[in-house]
Amino acid sequence: MKIRVRYFLVLASVLLLAYLLAQLDLSKTSAALANANYSLLFAALLATLFAMGARTMRWKFLLDERKKIGFWQVFTVQCAGIAASNFSPGKALEAVKVIPLKKNGFSYDFGLLTVFWERSFDVLVITSFAFLAFPFLNETIKLAIILAFGAVAVVMALMLRHFHKI
């Protein structure tokens, strides 16, 4: 049964890739690749890997509350979860990360809780970056950002004090 599912997934992947390649305008694609700035592409790749590593460390910290798990195990699950969530509205499929965690001895409810926490930290970080735009914003938007940041921080602080009890 598992072999059939694997063959089906490989076949579906090949068909999807073939469809996407058929939609490409090869002359425009080759021109874009010829004019690409590969140093910027490499810098973007490094920044992405750094961000994934930071998110992995943050999630690993949350998971280690219950049971120790290796960085590379968490990294592969993190990458797969983020890849899956890119195909869902509102990043809803990121919760599929808890399925591989079950094999490592984590319960689904604890895994979902850590995914929720991780998304909460993402909101906090994104809100923090909004402060960089402060010089360019009007007072109403500044106040809204401060209130949103404060609300998220207060809710997270209240939840954090109960995290170790789970």
Image: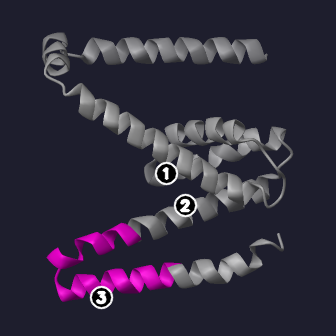
Identify the secondary structure beneath mark 2. helix
Label whose residue precedes the other's in the sequence (2 or 3): 2
Q: Residues within 10 Å of mark 2 (few under 14, many from 20)?
A: some
Q: CA distance from mark 2 to mark 1?
A: 9 Å
Task: Give the extent of the magenta segment.
Answer: 128-152
Work out whether residue 85 can be spotted: no
Q: Main secondary structure of the magenta part?
A: helix
Q: Quadrant of residue 9?
A: top right
Q: Amino acid at mark 3?
A: Leu
The residue at 34%/18% (across/down) is 20
Q: Amino acid at mark 2?
A: Arg
Q: Which mark is residue 119?
A: 2
Would you say the residues marked 2 and 1 are in contact, meaning their CB atoms lie under 8 Å apart? yes
Instruction: Give the number of the mark in front: 1 or 3.
Output: 3
The residue at 47%/44% (across/down) is 50
Identify the secondary structure beneath mark 3. helix
Label whose residue precedes the other's in the sequence (2 or 1): 1
Q: Which mark is residue 31?
A: none
Q: CA distance from mark 2 to mark 3?
A: 23 Å
